[in-house]
Amino acid sequence: MPTLRTLAIALAFGAAGLVQAGAAELPDLGGRSVQAVTENAYTPLNFADPETGEGIGWEYDAFNEIAKRLNLSVEWNLSSWDTMIQAVREGQFDIGMDGITITDERKTQVDFSEPYMVSEQFMLVRADEDRFADAETFATDDSLLVGAQAGTTNFYTAVYDVLDGKEDNPRIKLFETFGASVQALNSGDVDLVLMDATSAAGYIGASPDSFKVVGGPLGSEEFGFIFTPGSDLVEPINAAIQSMKDDGTIDALNQKWFFEYQAGQ
């Protein structure tokens, strides 16, 4: 069974294993103001601090560091997942982030940064789950339900890698937010939620007595920031991401959010 530490280490090595270029001097963007948007529902990438309600997480820290290195001024905004890509495409926001998987279809709508993280899909279940231990066993039991957020990588993984390839399969229960699907899992309304190693590590770390992962990875994905098509921010932000890989900042963020973070501490 994959452990929290195994998931986080796999994630960290995935990010570190991306092709690296030599360090380069970063441009100074002169305090330029940028509108950044996220959902605050994707632990530990972006979520509301349970103590203060403030938006925190890996992506907040990463982009605030990018802004510091490039001399950008960031104004943070919130959006639901189902409108985020369209809003960035139309220029309502300059940059979006929500653990967004880089796909060819999405590239037709928005520009992407270089990947800042590589992750794999895993099966998150309740800690006492003993009815199935892999995708094949789950698929054979018609009484078992999977929770997902429509239009996400997790939804399509459920459809094509776990079930029968039919997007209207009644065994898939849709939720408006990613967090709501995990709450449904915890309460017993569904039996499985598909998620990347990033989120699985975050939920297990926050509630080790409530959740675990079973089975092996069901595929890998690369996460990137999204931009309005033709944005001149892509190149400097790519350079800043690379500098953070080169100097160990990405590794430090992985350590902070996947190993060390504890809610309320």
Image (cartoon, helix red, strand yellow):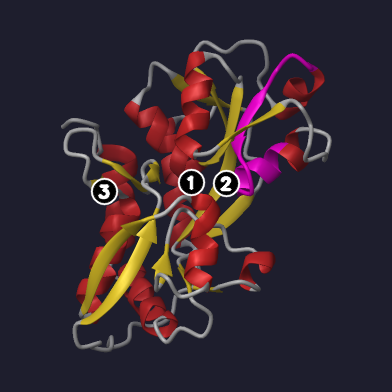
**Placement of 107 over or under 60, stated as above or below:** below
Q: Mark 3 points at which residue?
A: 55
**Placement of 43 over or under 147, stated as above or below:** below
Q: Is residue 39 visible to the viewer in this orientation of the structure?
A: yes
Residue 198, percent from left and from top: 45, 44
Residue that appears at 28% across and 61% down? 76
- For the residues bearing labels 2 and 1, Cβ distance under 8 angstroms: yes
**Given the image, on which type of amino acid does mark 1 rest?**
Ala
**Given the image, on which type of amino acid does mark 2 rest?**
Glu
- The crowding category of the residue bearing disc 3, from other C-alpha atoms within 10 Å (few below 14, some 14 to 19, many at least 20), is some
- Image quadrant where residue 102 sits: bottom right
Residue that appears at 72% across and 28% down? 135
Residue 10's disc is 1
| Precedes in sequence: disc 2 or disc 1 | 1
Q: Nearer the viewer, mark 3 or mark 2?
A: 3
Q: Mark 2 points at which residue?
A: 120
Tell me the CA gap for discs 1 and 3. 26 Å
Residue 54, percent from left and from top: 21, 45
Q: Look at the image and say whether residue 153 sits in the magenta stretch.
A: yes
- The crowding category of the residue bearing disc 1, from other C-alpha atoms within 10 Å (few below 14, some 14 to 19, many at least 20), is some
- State the SS at label 2: strand
- State the SS at label 3: strand
**Given the image, on which type of amino acid does mark 3 rest?**
Gly
- State the SS at label 1: helix
Q: Give the range drawn in magenta.
A: 141-158
Q: Quadrant of the image for the C terminus?
A: top left
